[in-house]
Amino acid sequence: MAKVEIKQPIVDEIKGYVADAKSAILVDYRGLTVEQDTALRKQLREAGVVYKVYKNTMLNRAFEGTDFAQLASHLEGPTAIAFGIEDATAPARILNNVAKTAPALEFKGGVVEGTYYDAEGVKLVANIPSREVLISNLLGSLQSPITNFARVLKQIAEKNEEVA
């Protein structure tokens, strides 16, 4: 079997993730212990993030013609990739949290919803709360004035009933 025939299914697998992904974060994982790597993979899996290690040439081929092609300059040395399928910021958030206790894990770069970020930019994206947290914060701030307004209206209505 030719090398191309062996590698094509792997490139197709990556293309499938690329097609579904809202984000992709590249990291250098050298120096992680087995325990750290296992804990990282578990956290990412629980958050619906696909975390894989592929050869850089295969990633490069799969990225061609997509927003993720901007990551080609970072495809040197050992590279792991985390695809955010459901939550665009989840890979950056989880990787950043793990990097706090495992300094060997280093960001290379990433693309979040079509926008390229270098290593420092990915760290900034990591500080953005999840969509669910943002929505709950918004709803909480919206409900507070509405609840107060409803109480005031009820008190006015009760006062008008007493007068009548």
Image: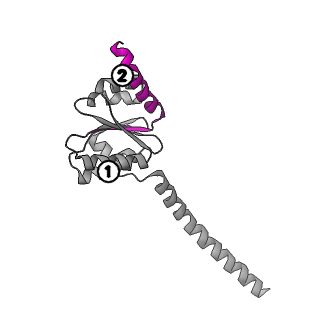
> Which secondary structure is most common in the magenta stretch?
helix
Please give left or right for residue 2 compared with residue 12 in the image: left
Outermost residue to the bottom: 162
Number of residues whose C-alpha sits closer than 10 Å to that of mark 1, classed few (under 14), some (14–19) or many (20 or more): few
Q: Is residue 164 above or below residue 39?
A: below
- The one of 146 and 78 positioned closer to us in this rendering: 78
Q: Position of residue 96 (x, y in %)?
A: 30, 49
Q: CA distance from mark 2 to mark 1?
A: 30 Å
Residue at the location (52% across, 64% down)?
140
Q: Quadrant of the C terminus?
A: bottom right
Q: Is residue 105 above or below residue 141?
A: above
Q: Which residue lies under the disc numbered 2?
A: 61
Q: Position of residue 11 (x, y in %)?
A: 39, 24
Please give left or right for residue 157 compared with residue 69 in the image: right
Q: Tell me which colouring the rendered structure shows.
A: one colour
Residue 81 quadrant = top left
- The one of 110 and 60 positioned closer to us in this rendering: 60
The stretch of residues the image draws in magenta is 1-28
* Disc nearest the viewer among 2 and 1: 1
Residue at the location (26% across, 50% down)?
35
Q: Which residue lies under the disc numbered 1?
A: 39
What's under tag 2, amino acid-wise?
Arg
Q: Is residue 70 above or below residue 27?
A: above
Residue at the location (72% across, 78% down)?
157
Q: Secondary structure at mark 1?
A: helix
What's under tag 1, amino acid-wise?
Ala
Q: Is residue 112 visible?
A: no
